[in-house]
């Protein structure tokens, strides 16, 4: 969309076509209200190789009314401003850049004092005008959750961000069922979002951490052009702490990250039409080109009995289709059997109008 950048940096990480995706460790509410647990999650994220540590900040009274079924849980695990300042400081000390998942204006004000490199908005706040405006005015890159949203709603949200100065937005697809069935993940929306809005897109996985597919499902998003991948982390799935259903333990998270990065290394960092050095080596090894199938004298007219198309150990010159297009040709010099035929070795045969 107009006014938004298609490639940009987040911290020292360059987002762009053909680059490895940004891997985000989503700590979410796995801290279960414990500052020490939140710090351990930051440490585990860094040790597992995350490119970004994501800390999720909210104010319960800004999220649900008193009668809501989640009110008691949210109130129990909510951290204070000072506790969050302590956690953010600890997370920054790991050396891994920190981003913040914010749900309300009070929480945004807290995190803007914490040297975060990016912000995340849940699809719940896709149309939250005051929060959109404030995030845009911060000048920070915004990861915009688009789950369960119409394209018209996404367009409205982007319009608000753009009108308030935002130019770095990543559209994040994700279905949050905790856990999400594989058939409901709809990962193809990563590609569709890019095509419809012309912006970088990413995927936040919420499939079952007990399912081996959760270690590889993100490769689908990678192949569809995801610039960022977000995966929940928890210290111990068996403890059953918030968001554990879609989370991986640190060792599994580290293995997942390694798998993604290895797969990303197979992507092209240059336009696919360009031949890489490996392509060129493969071309020499495999392609078939014209050779003399018998001794040919200068002036002899070439035909199917005197030319064969074989694999060589050097770059050839004339393919079978190119030879057919030449029409009737004759040799301009003597050629030994099995010698490669070059363009300079041929000329139009006498009386032939093609050349």
Image (cartoon, rainbow, N blue to C red):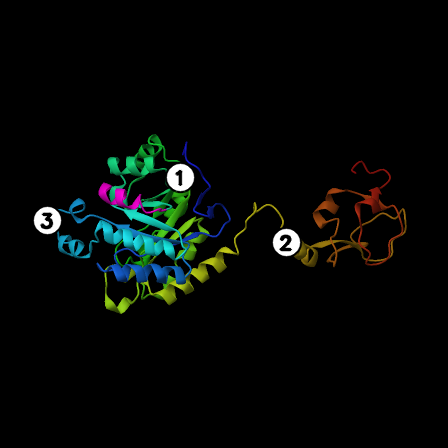
Tell whether label 3 touches label 1 (CB within 8 Å). no
Mark 3: few/some/many CA within 10 Å (<14, 14-19, 20+): few
Tell me what residue is drawn at x 52 percent, y 56 percent: 265
Closer to the chain start, of discs 2 and 3, is: 3
Residue 19 as seen in the image, left or right of residue 254: right
> In the displayed structure, would residue 259 be above or below residue 203?
below
- Residue at which label 1 appears: 168
As for residue 114 lying within the magenta part, the answer is: yes
Res. 63 mark: none
The magenta stretch spans which residues? 104-116
Toward which corner of the image does residue 125 lie, by quadrant? top left
Q: Whole-percent x and y of residue 188? A: 38, 49
Give the quadrant of the C terminus: top right
Closer to viewer: mark 1 or mark 2: 1
Q: Whole-percent x and y of residue 62? A: 18, 44
- Residue at which label 2 appears: 279
């Amino acid at each position: 969309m107009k006014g938004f950048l298609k490639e940009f940096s987040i911290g020292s990480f360059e987002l762009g076509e053909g680059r490895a995706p940004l891997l985000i460790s989503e700590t979410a509410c796995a801290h279960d209200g414990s500052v020490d647990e939140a710090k351990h999650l930051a440490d585990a994220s860094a040790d597992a190789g995350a490119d970004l540590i994501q800390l999720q900040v909210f104010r319960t009274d800004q999220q649900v009314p008193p009668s809501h079924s989640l009110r008691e849980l949210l109130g129990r695990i909510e951290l204070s401003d000072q506790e969050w300042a302590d956690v953010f400081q600890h997370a920054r000390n790991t050396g891994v850049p920190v981003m913040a998942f914010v749900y309300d204006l009070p929480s945004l004000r807290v995190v803007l004092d914490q040297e975060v490199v990016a912000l995340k908005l849940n699809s719940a706040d896709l149309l939250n005008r005051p929060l959109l405006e404030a995030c845009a005015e911060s000048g920070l890159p915004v990861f915009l959750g688009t789950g369960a949203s119409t394209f018209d709603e996404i367009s409205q949200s982007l319009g608000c961000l753009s009108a308030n100065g935002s130019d770095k937005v990543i559209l994040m697809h994700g279905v949050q069922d905790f856990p999400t069935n594989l058939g409901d993940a709809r990962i193809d929306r990563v590609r569709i979002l890019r095509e419809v809005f012309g912006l970088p897109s990413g995927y936040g996985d919420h499939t079952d951490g007990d399912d081996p597919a959760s270690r590889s499902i993100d490769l689908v998003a990678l192949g569809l052009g995801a610039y960022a991948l977000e995966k929940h982390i928890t210290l111990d799935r068996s403890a059953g702490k918030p968001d554990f259903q879609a989370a991986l333990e640190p060792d599994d998270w580290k293995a997942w990250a390694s798998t993604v990065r290895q797969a990303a290394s197979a992507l092209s960092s240059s336009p696919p039409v360009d031949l890489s050095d490996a392509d060129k080596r493969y071309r020499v090894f495999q392609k078939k080109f014209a050779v003399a199938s018998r001794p040919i004298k200068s002036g002899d007219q070439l035909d199917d009995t005197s030319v064969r198309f074989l694999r060589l150990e050097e770059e050839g010159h004339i393919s079978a289709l190119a030879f057919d297009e030449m029409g009737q040709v004759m040799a301009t010099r003597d050629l030994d059997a099995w010698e490669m035929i070059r363009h300079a070795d041929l000329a139009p045969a006498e009386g032939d109008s093609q050349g």
